[in-house]
Amino acid sequence: MDIKRVATDAVTETIVMTVVQMDYKGQVAKRINEKMPLATVKGFRKGAVPKDLVEKQYGKGIKQEEVQKVVDLALERFVQSERLNLLGTPLAKVNEDFDWSAEELVFEYEIGLVPNFELDLEAKNDIVKYVVTADDKLIEGQLERIQKQFGTAIPQEVVAADSDVTGTFTNEEKGINNATTIAADLFKDKATFDLFIGKKVGDVVTVNTKGLFDDDHQLMDVMKVSHDDVHGLEVDVNFTIEAINTAELAELNQELFDKLFGAGTVSSLEELKAKIKEDAETQFAQQADQKLLGDVTEFLIESTKFDLPAEFLKKWLQTVGEKKLSPEEAEVEYVRSEKGLRFQLIEGRAMAQSDIKITFEDLKTFTTKNIRQQMAQFGQTNPTDEEVQGIVARVLSNQDEVKRLSDQVVAEKLLELFKEKANPTTKEVTYDEFIAASYGE
């Protein structure tokens, strides 16, 4: 068999395979011999059919099957031996006039190659690393929420400016159906809550999702909108009122402090404020890191130029998945996924350039930290190592969890790499300023 590569462009090639009789003749003959005792042809009893009739009836199909086996195996070995870094899988070129009786059978497979490109992680940029602080306004707001949460609910007949209103947001078209409690400070425009003033249990208030909150991502919590649907969502939602309460605020005393953080952890209002500030800024740091990772990702995608085998990938997309795509659907899918594919390649190059590898110990350490954090959230502040490692072992026995956690470890390592190499400008801001920088005014 003769196999060669023919370049179409820098990222697309055709593998040409020429198959001769010697490549498949012996296996075809073996299959014919195996078929003879089982062959049935009218006029002959089973097992007594002349060989030439068996070959005439079954030979073409057997030949095609055996040739395809030879081609598939040779193609797999060729890709491995040439160390081809493919995007997608090889696509057979369709030849409507293919002649199976020819002495030489020529098969062609189109392939898309991972592009070769330079990645400059230290390129000049205007990326900002935000350090988000919890200001007095935020801390006082959190104090009030704590006092409400642990206070006494007093039922009301109608909604007033200081009411907490429990009900359900719905929009049938978008599949929104979520029960929640709202108050005047929930909405971006405080006048929105005026729509609720004077309403009673059973009344329905309609609001539009566009610009409803300071951060559109609040739609994920308040209405259980998926992340993909959050940005730019502009639909009317109905809120059916189910309960109206005002809160008699809880006292800021030692009993409340112990409920919040465990006995003796916090013993004064000043310590409580310090703890709120610490916890908030820890959470803000995680959000700031995610923004930094997103900003570096966008910068690298825009600044790192390389060609993709676009036409090949569009054809390949038509062949994969349970539902075959039309050319038009494949075009849409390619446009949707192109940016993600580009960053996947950039991510791989960044890890290779910086010799970043994910070991099982990395995964185990990351999982252990996550488990301890989750247990602390549920009040288990001092679990034994044996308890934690038992949970870790169960988690890491699930391949889906291993994949999910591995992706998180990669993101964490890349974040540290980007912080070092991209050298972003550090800027200290309040949470409101951070939200404005992240999602606009």
Image: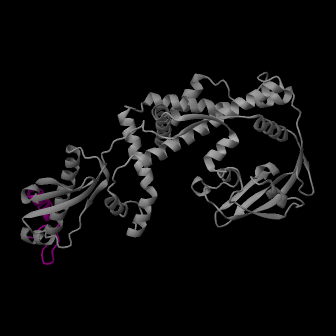
Q: Residue at x 83, y 61 (%)?
A: 195
Could you tell whether 138 is left or right of 344 in the image? right
> In the depicted view, which residue is nearer to us: 336 or 396?
336
> In the depicted view, which residue is nearer to us: 439 or 39?
439
Q: Residue at x 76, y 26 (%)?
A: 262
Extent of the magenta region: 24-49
> In the depicted view, which residue is nearer to us: 261 or 14?
14
Image quarter (top left, top right, bottom left or bottom right) of the N terminus? bottom left
The image quarter in which residue 291 lies: top right
> In the depicted view, which residue is nearer to us: 7 or 71?
7
Q: State yes or no: residue 32 in magenta.
A: yes
Q: Tell me where residue 315 appears, x and y as whole percent.
A: 33, 63
Colour option used:
one colour
Image height of 264 relative to 155, above or below: above
Could you tell whether 328 is left or right of 135 in the image? left
Q: Residue at x 40, y 65 (%)?
A: 331
The total number of labels drawn is 0
Q: State yes or no: residue 330 in magenta.
A: no
Could you tell whether 210 is left or right of 205 in the image? left
Could you tell whether 340 is left or right of 26 in the image? right
Image height of 420 relative to 401, above or below: above
Q: Tell me where residue 117 appears, x and y as whole percent.
A: 32, 44
